[in-house]
Amino acid sequence: MTGAGADPEAGPAREFVVEADGGSRGNPGPAGYGAVVLDAATGETLAEAAEYLGVVTNNVAEYRGLVAGLRAARELDPDATVRVRMDSKLVVEQMSGRWKIKHPDMKPLAAEAARVFPPGRVTYEWIPRAENKHADRLANEAMDAGARGERWSPSTSTADLDTGRSAGGRTATDGG
């Protein structure tokens, strides 16, 4: 089944990698997330998102990063397939259906993430923190901006410096 406006002549749907991260300075504490959408074939950075969240838990920030990354991927191609890579074992295992979601704050966030793409179009993979530098730096940039009373701006981001990938289609997000 294809989404509205899909071109049947365009061939197979695109494949994206979403790398997402969230963090809080204290738990709960001042928090933010970062997410990057990559072309699965080339590794090119297609979109970035980051936001300061105020005072929330680390797990809430991780889930908010996931949602933002999935939404950014959907904006690029609603028919895409997505491989999510995160260093949060909790989020990866819960979204993969292997762990039960018990915390009441996580259930609506997980449901929101699951609604962005149809079931079966998103897979989840845990990666070590060292492999998630781009999203981690975006989350830290968002927290730093929040501490200054500012919003994160893609024009001031240096997250791509960690990867050497181009950032052709950076996108700011306000979480809405």
Image: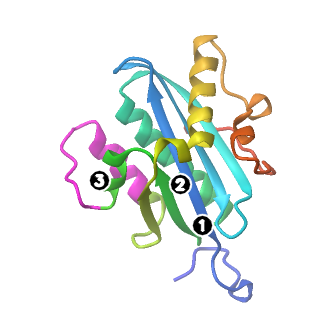
Residue at image point 73% right, 66% down = 42
Span of residues in magenta: 97-114
In front of the other: 75 or 123: 123
Report the amino acid beneath label 1.
Pro
Q: Earlier in the sequence, mark 3 or mark 1?
A: 1
Residue 168 is a magenta residue? no
Q: Residues within 10 Å of mark 3 (few under 14, many from 20)?
A: some
Q: Earlier in the sequence, mark 2 or mark 1?
A: 2
Residue 104 is a magenta residue? yes
In front of the other: 53 or 168: 168
Residue at image point 34% right, 21% down = 27
Question: In the image, residue 116 lies at what x, y percent?
Answer: 48, 58
Question: In the image, residue 82 lies at what x, y percent?
Answer: 53, 65
Q: Give the number of the disc on residue 78.
A: 1
Label 2 secondary element: helix
Q: Answer whether residue 174 is visible to the viewer in this image.
A: no
Q: CA distance from mark 3 to mark 2?
A: 16 Å
* Mark 3 lies on residue: 94
In front of the other: 131 or 120: 131
Q: Answer whether residue 131 is visible to the viewer in this image.
A: yes
Question: In the image, residue 90 lies at what x, y percent?
Answer: 31, 46
Report the amino acid beneath label 3.
Gln
Q: Which quadrant of the figure has residue 14?
A: bottom right
Q: Give the number of the disc on residue 70.
A: 2
Q: Which quadrant of the figure has residue 99?
A: bottom left
> Is residue 114 shown left or right of residue 140?
left
Label 1 secondary element: loop
Q: CA distance from mark 3 to mark 1?
A: 23 Å
Q: Is residue 67 above or below residue 119?
A: above
